[in-house]
Amino acid sequence: MRVLVAVPALNEAAAIGQVLSSLAAVHPIGDVVIVDDGSRDNTAAIARAAGAHVVSHAINLGVGAAMGTAFKYAVRNGYDAVIQFDGDGQHRTEHIGELIAALDGADIVIGSRFAVGGTYKSSAARRSVQRLIAGVTSLFARTRLTDATSGFRIAGPRALAVFAEHYPVEWLGDTVESIVLATRQNLTVREIPVDMNERAGGVPSQSVFKATLYTARIMFILGLATIRTVPPQVRSANRRQKAEAAA
Amino acid sequence: MTPQILAIVMAVVLLVAVIVLLRSYVLPEKYAVLWLIAAVAAIVLSAWPGLLEGVSRFFGIASAINLLFVGAFFVMFLLLMQITLELARTRDELRRAVQRLALDIEKATPNDND
């Protein structure tokens, strides 16, 4: 199984060199693609010098679009699975093998910071926000989740086929809405516990107001995700597939 | 059909239209928020005229209908401003993207001097 490690990156010149060298130790660097999402610094140049493939957006489109590009890249280059790996050094490479192994029997595996076995430290406020989000997502996705906003995840062949056609972009859709979208397409979502390095900047829970706004947005997206129709690109891709199978 | 029933029906149709457009990926989420608020406010106000009367009296406005017009105008203003700003931002991004791509294409295309 060919696995692509996709690193969406925005102005990560400081961290990207380190991230890539630790990745190269566990995964062939030729199977790593940096999606440079309109960086103003020389993130792309550093990544290229390290031997990774680099796809550059002419302007900043957001993480959702960057991963969308990564999924399209994966399909174009014959990959079977895609791992999302952050370019800021938060994710740990030792879990890559575990994610790949866990793909046996699931379409998407999420590396959860809060599952049993994780040692991730965060403030009580942030944990309760995350727990609420994971709880509501679990309800809508009809699957047991403890960390719905983790970007550290692997998408298997069936998920890759859907996401290459349509990946949610705005409003944190790339983390939370993608899960509901996947389960509504009858894909299975599992979790494994992972450790992550401490985040320097911090998730948008810096003030109570921002945290409430963040949670409200996620609830809105989740509620919407449950009543959504099949995305038009996915629908036409499915139709095309059926036509090919019939022919 | 009384004017009130007509108003409620129209407001509900507006809400349904927004939801249908939202779920079929035609209307993006960030625009939908204002439209949803406007549609729900329209339903509430047309179903409960007493609310409008009460609020007008609180502000010392003699005619409740004036408050309705002012409020509706304000909402329209917000919606138009949102679209205008978004359009401006998009044009700016488009220009920068075209400029960047033009430079990349120039670099990648050999001219007769090379």
Image (tube, coloured by chain):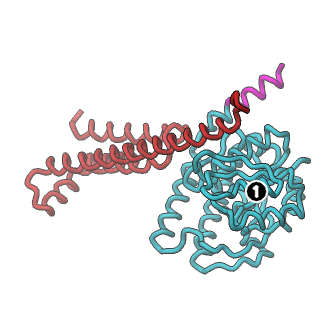
Chain colours: A cyan, B red
Residue farthest toward the right in the current orientation of the protein: A1
Would you place residue A144 above or below residue A121 in this image?
Answer: above
| Rendered residue at 81%/58% (across/down) | A50
Question: Residue B36 appears at what percent x and percent y?
Answer: 40, 48
Q: Is residue A137 magenta?
A: no
Magenta stretch: give its range. Answer: A236-247
Inspect this view and state whether residue A222 appears: yes
Residue A20's image quarter?
bottom right
| Rendered residue at 23%/46% (across/down) | B73
Asked if residue A165 lies left or right of residue A129, the reply is right
Question: Residue A215 appears at what percent x and percent y?
Answer: 53, 64
Question: Residue A56 appears at what percent x and percent y?
Answer: 68, 47
Give A85 or A98, whichever is nearer the viewer.
A85
Question: Residue B114 appears at what percent x and percent y?
Answer: 73, 33
Asked if residue B27 lies left or right of residue B42, the reply is right
Give B79 or B112, whichever is nearer the viewer.
B112
Chain of the residue that carries numbered disc 1 in the rendered image: A
- Amino acid under label 1? Ala
Residue farthest toward the front in the current orientation of the protein: B113
Q: How many marks?
A: 1
Quadrant for the N terminus of chain B in the image: top left
Residue A87's image quarter?
bottom right
Mark 1 lies on residue: A47
Would you place residue A188 above or below residue A237 in this image?
Answer: below
- Label 1, secondary structure: give it: helix
Would you place residue B49 above or below residue B17 in this image?
Answer: below
The main secondary structure of the magenta stretch is helix
Crowding at dot 1, Cα within 10 Å, few <14 / some 14-19 / many 20+, comes out as many
| Rendered residue at 14%/51% (across/down) | B64
Residue farthest toward the left in the current orientation of the protein: B62
Asked if residue A5 lies left or right of residue B73, the reply is right
| Rendered residue at 79%/70% (across/down) | A194
